[in-house]
Image (tube, rainbow, N blue to C red):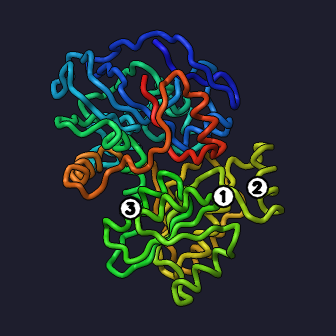
Amino acid sequence: MKANVWTGRNRLEIQDVPDPQILNARDAIVRVTSTAICGSDLHLVDGYIPTVKKGDVLGHEFMGEVVEVGPGVRNLHVGDRVVVPFPIACGACFACEAELYSVCENSNPNAGIAEKLMGHAPAGIFGYSHMLGGFPGGQAEYVRVPFADVGPIKIEDDLPDESVLFLSDIFPTGFMGAEMCDIKPGQTIAIWGAGPVGQFAAASAFLLGADRVIVIDRFPYRLRRVQRTGAEVLNYEEVNVLEALRDMTGGRGPDACIDAVGMEAHHPTPAMYAYDRTKQAARMETERPYVLREAIMACRNGGVVSVIGVYGGFVDKFPMGTVMNRSLTIRTGQCHVQRYTEPLLNRIRAGEIDPSFVISHRMPLSEAPRGFELFKHKQDECNKVVLTP
């Protein structure tokens, strides 16, 4: 089959790879009908996530048609149309029973690698390094889905792929980021990052009752897109963000702040950006955590900092004194997607939101490397790329 594979830092190719096969009784094989490029894929392409190997198939946002099921899968049948969550979860361990699916204790066969870096291992993830299981991803014609009786959600109506595809990751991720803020009526939420996840976080904050949402970014086209959700915007290259947020909130600061950027944040001050960029390039730290630092400094006393941008290892100059002395709460995690798919599908069916609003580019799988270039370098106002095998 054809698949988009990693062949080295900043190098992707469409190659022929072996067709997936049923390896376990609880597996299914899915013929991919739609897949997408995610911002967190860029961390792999840029070489900042360890244990990515030449020939690895990328992609963790995908949906399609079930073409084969193992004998242990009784809730799916050949011909079913499904969206597949990006974390792989067994459904029976301590974490899964607590609905903490992205830290499933049984789905990562390479847990020992992750434990050396993180202390304990998270769940396996499609197309996201051997440290997280080495599972081939969804930017391909077919995918093997382990624990298929737990993850995939059936789409049994005529909703188009583009309206439900993002239940695989970025819609639940943005929603969880807003949910972790414990939003109450009248509150103000600030979000760093106006990419697709930030756009979903903004829309979700309003769904959960926020009075105001303020989104920070530097690309005018992304700021225009997020304004469609009702959010106010700040361009951090034109204003001092901390001063602007204080002014907009009567000096108090936002009630909660969401980091929807993660480990490759940009910095408006050349010297500070060079500091983090140099240390990251030299592998002396794995992150550029400027957004995380600023979100912590901006949040009101006693507020919540919700972190849904992807981080891979260690950060420098973390303002722990601010967190402790100002009674801040930090909440974070890879999204527990299986917890959210059914409720969010119901919101889509009810017409509360159509997630397809984030899509800017559509192209065949054969053009995935070009799609990555557009997405990474913000060319042609690229916001979200959907690929069709």
The amino acid on which the numbered mark 1 sits, given as a three-letter code, is Pro
Which tag is nearer the camera, tag 1 or tag 3? 3
Query: Is residue 362 in view from this perspective?
Result: yes
The amino acid on which the numbered mark 2 sits, given as a three-letter code, is Asp
Q: Is residue 89 above or below residue 357?
A: above
Dot 1 and dot 3 residues touching (CB under 8 Å): no
Q: Counting other residues with Cα less than 10 Å from the Cα at mark 1, is it few (<14), some (14-19), or many (20 or more)?
A: many
* Residue under the point 58% across and 73% down: 323
Residue corresponding to mark 3: 203
Whole-percent x and y of residue 81? 24, 29
Displayed quadrant of residue 247: bottom right
Q: Is residue 69 above or below residue 324?
A: above
Precedes in sequence: disc 2 or disc 1? 2
243 left or right of 113 in image: right
Q: What is the secondary structure assignment of the residue under circle 2?
A: helix
Residue corresponding to mark 2: 276
Displayed quadrant of residue 347: bottom left
Dot 2 and dot 1 residues touching (CB under 8 Å): yes
Quadrant containing the N terminus in the rendered view = top left
The amino acid on which the numbered mark 3 sits, given as a three-letter code, is Ala
Q: In this view, does 297 lie above or below 36?
A: below
Point out which mark residue 81 bears: none
Which tag is nearer the camera, tag 3 or tag 2? 3
Whole-percent x and y of residue 187? 40, 79
Point out which mark residue 289 bears: 1
Q: Counting other residues with Cα less than 10 Å from the Cα at mark 3, is it few (<14), some (14-19), or many (20 or more)?
A: many
**Distance between the Cα atoms at labels 1 and 3?**
24 Å
Quadrant containing the C terminus in the rendered view = top left
Precedes in sequence: disc 1 or disc 3? 3
Q: What is the secondary structure assignment of the residue under circle 1?
A: loop
